[in-house]
Image: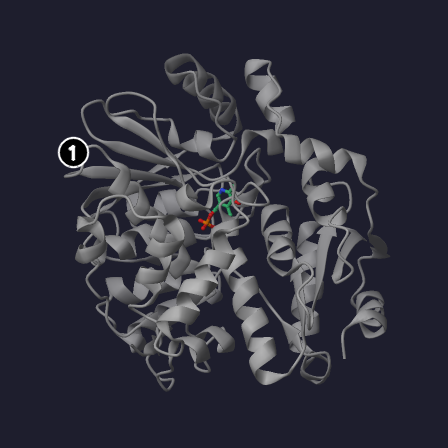
């Protein structure tokens, strides 16, 4: 299987090369040249998670042997609470299920992609003999998932910038209490936007980027998207007979990676009737899928911070399929989007996607509702999925974070404070971080002194 750019004018690459290159040279994102059938996987009964993931990746990866792929996935999911059932499907009522994606090392669904990416980097470092220095900015979940994907890996160091005082105490501890000497959390005296701007400046300083061997772990990474297709198949395998035919998936959405993975699985044969894009008050995708208009606005920080996204970076992949693979049109539309223009995209308010939107008061209300209706405690992101419940249609809600990561919001809603022993243990450790001004030169200097050469 080869991988093509969404913009159609970059040479096709193999899986490992597409993974290593990140962005395609024409500015597009890599997509598989065709979508293989997953029917043989669907027909199987429940399969051990690492085995299922390995079978799925063998449809795409021709660079590694079957044995290497098996090993990669056994390792990647060994850090989950129950590796064989990494994504448990919980029945809330006759027709409503929750697929819990928060049983990885950082208790958010990003572990599914980033545990894998960490191991793929490790393999790449061993194969090429070249070290990497990963640099990123985080508003919470991605940074800690990337850190836990790469902690203690030889030949890699990780530098994560985050805004001092603006992420939750637990999220900060997840990054600063790893005890790994290749992890460098940097709290900056500024906002998340400042952190992102500094990272962007450093990646655009090509001389520094090459010399420092900087790498990114962003949400456009191909391996992350494919890794996320797997839990949709895993969920399907666990559904009782009689509930498998017309399933509605409801997905907390920010960068559009999670729900895109489900939709791709649908194109490969997963029986799915509908995908509901659940946004918070940053509702660009809600408006797009209900009105057909792409109209960016300013980000407005919410109680579901990992969905506070303005430009959904994986949207380009969907657009490519929506336009029947027309690279030229994809490129034109993405250029319009980049200029910040409002855009009408025909056919968008139809099809398998629907959308729902929840503002901060709705998040609190829905946490209460999930507790009242189902005796289920949902985190603020997942709670965006509890708006319209349609009895008699099989519905799977994807739960993206453990509620114990957001004790303040949960307490406000239902006056209980969920905990998790691993998160509690973090309180006993001494945080290690560097505090620096929100200034590109200061960060560059710190990197110069600490990167792996
Ligand atoms: C990242 C994240 C999301 C958004 O997922 P996308 O793939 O960016 O749409 C939702 N919930 C949580 C908890 C997250 O960490």
Q: Is residue 86 above or below residue 311?
A: above
Secondary structure, mark 1, is loop
Question: Of all residues shown, which one is farthest toward the front?
Answer: 67
Residue 183 image offset from top left, x and y in percent = 74, 59
Residue at image position (45%, 41%) is 101
Q: Position of residue 187 (x, y in %)?
A: 78, 51
In this rendering, would 426 be left or right of 52? right
Classify residue 35 as left or right of residue 279: left
Residue 416 in the image, given as x and y percentages of width and height = 60, 16
Which image quarter is the N terminus in?
A: bottom left
How far across and down, in percent of the image, does residue 98 sit? Answer: 37, 32
When the figure is inspected, residue 2 is found, relative to residue 340, above or below; the finding is below
- In this figure, which residue is indicated by the disc labeled 1? 241
Residue at left offset 58%, top offset 40%: 305
Q: How many marks?
A: 1
Instruction: State which quarter of the image contains the C terminus.
Output: bottom right
Please report the residue visible at 64 percent of the width from the left and 50 percent of the height from the top: 144
Q: Is residue 341 visible?
A: no
Res 73 → quadrant:
bottom left
Q: Nearer the viewer, residue 203 or 149?
A: 149
Pick the residue in front: 352 or 328: 352
- Indicate the quadrant where residue 264 lies: bottom left
Q: What scheme was used to colour the molecule? A: one colour
Asked which quadrant contains residue 86, the reply is top left
Asked whether residue 116 is in view, the answer is yes
Q: Residues within 10 Å of mark 1 (few under 14, many from 20)?
A: few
Q: Is mark 1 within 8 Å of ligand 1?
A: no
Residue at horizontal 18%, vertical 33%? 243
């Amino acid at each position: 299987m080869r991988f093509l750019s969404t913009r159609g004018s970059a040479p096709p690459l193999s899986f490992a090369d597409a993974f290593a290159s990140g962005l395609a040279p024409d500015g597009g994102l890599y997509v598989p040249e065709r979508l293989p059938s997953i029917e043989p996987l669907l027909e199987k009964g429940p399969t051990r998670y690492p085995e299922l993931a390995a079978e799925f990746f063998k449809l795409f990866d021709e660079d590694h042997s079957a044995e290497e792929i098996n090993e990669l996935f056994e390792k990647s999911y060994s850090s989950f609470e129950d590796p064989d059932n990494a994504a448990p499907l919980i029945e809330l009522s006759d027709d409503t299920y929750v697929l819990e994606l928060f049983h990885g090392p950082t208790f958010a669904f990003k572990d599914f992609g980033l545990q894998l990416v960490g191991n793929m980097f490790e393999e790449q470092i061993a194969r090429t003999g070249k070290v990497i220095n990963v640099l990123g900015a985080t508003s919470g979940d991605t940074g800690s998932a990337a850190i836990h994907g790469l902690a203690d890996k030889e030949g890699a160091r990780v530098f994560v910038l985050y805004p001092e005082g603006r992420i939750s105490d637990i999220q900060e501890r997840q990054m600063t209490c790893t005890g790994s000497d290749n992890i460098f959390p940097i709290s900056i005296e500024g906002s998340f936007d400042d952190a992102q701007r500094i990272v962007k400046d450093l990646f655009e300083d090509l001389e520094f980027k090459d010399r420092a061997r900087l790498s990114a772990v962003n949400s456009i990474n191909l391996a992350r998207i494919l890794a996320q297709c797997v839990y949709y198949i895993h969920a399907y395998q666990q559904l009782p007979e009689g509930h498998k035919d017309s399933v509605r998936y409801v997905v907390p959405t920010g960068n559009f990676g999670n729900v895109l993975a489900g939709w791709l699985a649908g194109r490969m044969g997963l029986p799915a009737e509908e995908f509901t894009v659940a946004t918070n008050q940053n509702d660009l995708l809600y408006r797009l899928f209900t009105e057909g208009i792409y109209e960016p606005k300013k980000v407005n920080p919410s109680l579901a911070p990992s969905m506070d996204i303005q430009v959904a970076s994986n949207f380009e992949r969907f657009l490519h399929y929506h336009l029947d693979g027309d690279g030229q049109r994809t490129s034109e539309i993405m250029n319009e989007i980049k200029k910040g223009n409002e855009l009408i995209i025909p056919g968008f308010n139809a099809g398998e996607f629907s959308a729902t939107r929840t503002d901060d008061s709705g998040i609190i209300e829905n946490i209460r509702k999930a507790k009242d209706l189902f005796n289920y405690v949902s985190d603020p992101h997942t709670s965006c999925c509890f708006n319209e419940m349609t009895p008699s249609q099989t519905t799977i809600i994807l739960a993206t974070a453990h509620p114990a990561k957001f004790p303040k919001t949960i307490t406000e809603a239902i006056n209980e404070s969920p905990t998790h022993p691993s998160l509690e243990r973090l309180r006993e450790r001494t945080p290690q971080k560097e505090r620096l001004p929100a200034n590109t030169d200061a960060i560059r200097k710190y990197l110069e002194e600490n990167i792996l050469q």
